[in-house]
Image: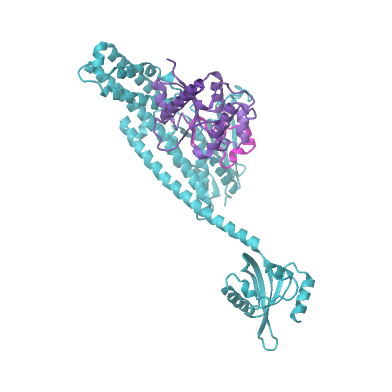
Chain colours: A purple, B cyan
Amino acid sequence: MKKPSVLWIEDSARFELRNLVGQLFFGGKYEFNLAEDVTSAVNQLQAREYDAVIVDIRLPPGIDAEWRKLYQQTGFDRVHAQLGLKLLRWLLTRDNSIHPAAPPEWIKPHQIAVFTVEGKGEIQTHLDDLGITVFRQKSAGLRDTVLLELIDELLARAQTTFAQDRAL
Amino acid sequence: MNPPDLLRELNILDLPIGVYVVAPDGRLLACNRPVRALFNLPLQGDVRANIAQFYADPKMRDALLGKAAEAEARGAHLEKEIVAFRVGERKIYVEDYCKPLRDPATREIIAYVGCLVDVTAEHEADKRESKFQKRIEELTFDIGRILHANTGTLLMAQQTLDGVAEALGQRAIKELITVPLEERDEQLIKEAALLANAIDKLAQATEPERRCQALSGAHWDALLSKIAPLRQARDLVPGMEMRAPALRATAHQIAAICQEMTPGVLARELVRETVRAAAQLENSSCLVDALMTRTAIIQMDSTLRSLRDFITADIRVYEPKKKLSVKQLTDQALAQIAEFARSSRVDIVRRDRDFDTAVEGVERDLVRALTNLLHNAIKYSWRRDRAKAPWVVIRTYARAGMACVEVENWGVPIAQEEIEQGLIFQLGYRGKWSKDRGRLGTGIGLTDAKRTAQTHYGDLRVASRPSNPGWIQSDDPTFYNQPFVTTVTFCIPEAVRR
């Protein structure tokens, strides 16, 4: 059986959050990929479909000129730029004022979870607008299984949505 | 002149400030339009009001008259006295200039004459500013205290990690941190392969039926599923930073499964070999993880110290400038950064060791500025030689009356436009490429160093160029992926020799 494919878009995965990913690589449960900036995330999303995509809100732009321009225009730092939200808006609303390229067709809100330091209240309106329901806040004291649990939750929801869509 | 005449004269003069005459009991004998407007009185006709009714604090009038009498005794008059009045619901503030009028014959006080200037807006603004100032001072103090407390916590965490690392590595921490992480990573990959071989051997050496007597089928599936990933650890996990926790978790799971084995079913030596290999891998990967976290903590500690020093700079007792030796300042900065350099495995190469000159300045600020520059250089250094640790070069020299400390590193670039537009000197600004490899930073270091140089009548210069110019063109998207040589030069005037 094909393993579910997961993309985590997170610039702190390699250092601060490295303990969360350890089990994913060797667990053999998922086909796991990591993107550490928006450009490489977009490249990976354009290249293939994923069953689950987990997105951080404070992301660096990477080398793509348009994302870099956007990053510079919105304060030149990850906190103010909130490039993760812009990426989500571009992906889900196909807003080409964010980036002129066309986003991949396959991505839907039920395939996306947000995992960030922002409190839910701070970005709730955006999440509601985009139809994203799976959210987890990063904070000290998180278990090292939090990412696994988040992926499982997202995949379960995606499956339910898929079943509901088929029933309709 | 009687009051109505006086009133007329005052209004004819159309003065821009309020002018009044009051009786000793407070009755307003005469006042011009600005005073009437101030107290919401009819702009024409008799005044029929007593100034005492407007005082926000009724005791204030007696105090004010007392001050006016004292001023008169000195041959002066009351000046710029701030008085609070209440007019309806509104509180107003005026500057009062006042003196008594005496009967020439009896020397009795028959009235007070004076001017009022409405300063409500200015007074409110001053009050707000002073409230904010107080709040900022409290906040600064709190931030300083919190950062101080966090520094203590970080020290505790670092020392705990030292203990953990020494227990795992069976060596003193100062020896453990000399081994490059790349070497430890290679060791982990070897140990992962050994564990894979041990599991493989254990499985191969036992008949399937017998195997199931020792462990459940699910456990065997779990064990066997680890063989291939353990052998492919290098390719499977991108980056050595994530390899250690991944291997640690896997080794731990294998060790836990081994504990479930029914004793006496499988070859004892092979079980022991598997358990030993799993324990060794878990031990080594924990050690690597502990050492990496220790480095991050020391880096954070250094950042917090610098942040605390910067934030509390304005509320510290004023430190006068004095004559200081550049060599000693550099030595102090190097001593402060030594632990961070060691834990980051970056060597400091000092040129012009014998050079020295004197500067005039605030010792604490200068040491902090130099420490910040060294901190950045260490943090943003890449390894350029497999046989050698990364290194940062520090040079000191004097040129055209300026004493200069130059810090050079090889690694993370600073974009040309960031230097040209002065972005890197903006408070809180983090360089575009400064977040590579998870580097922590506050965006204060260069701002503070430049400010310190300037308050000492000097300046800070930054240059960043590709290590191999011409290899990659500047319009290539990968231009900033190559190593850059970044030189930061801190110059302040040499002290005048006497």
In the foreground, B199 or B477: B199
**Above or below, comparing residue B422 to residue B180 in the picture:** below
| Rendered residue at 67%/88% (across/down) | B106
- Look at the image and tell me in which quarter the N terminus of chain A lies: top left
- Magenta range is B413-440
In the foreground, B143 or A7: A7
Q: Quadrant of residue B427?
A: top right
Q: Quadrant of residue B12?
A: bottom right
Place of residue A36 in the rendered image (x, y in percent of width and height, measured from the top left): 51, 27
Residue B205 appears in view:
no
**Above or below, comparing residue A130 to residue A31 in the picture:** below
Magenta region includes residue B35: no
Q: Quadrant of residue B294?
A: top left
Place of residue A61 in the rendered image (x, y in percent of width and height, measured from the top left): 57, 29
Is residue B242 rendered to the left or right of residue B37? left
Q: Residue furthest front?
A: A168
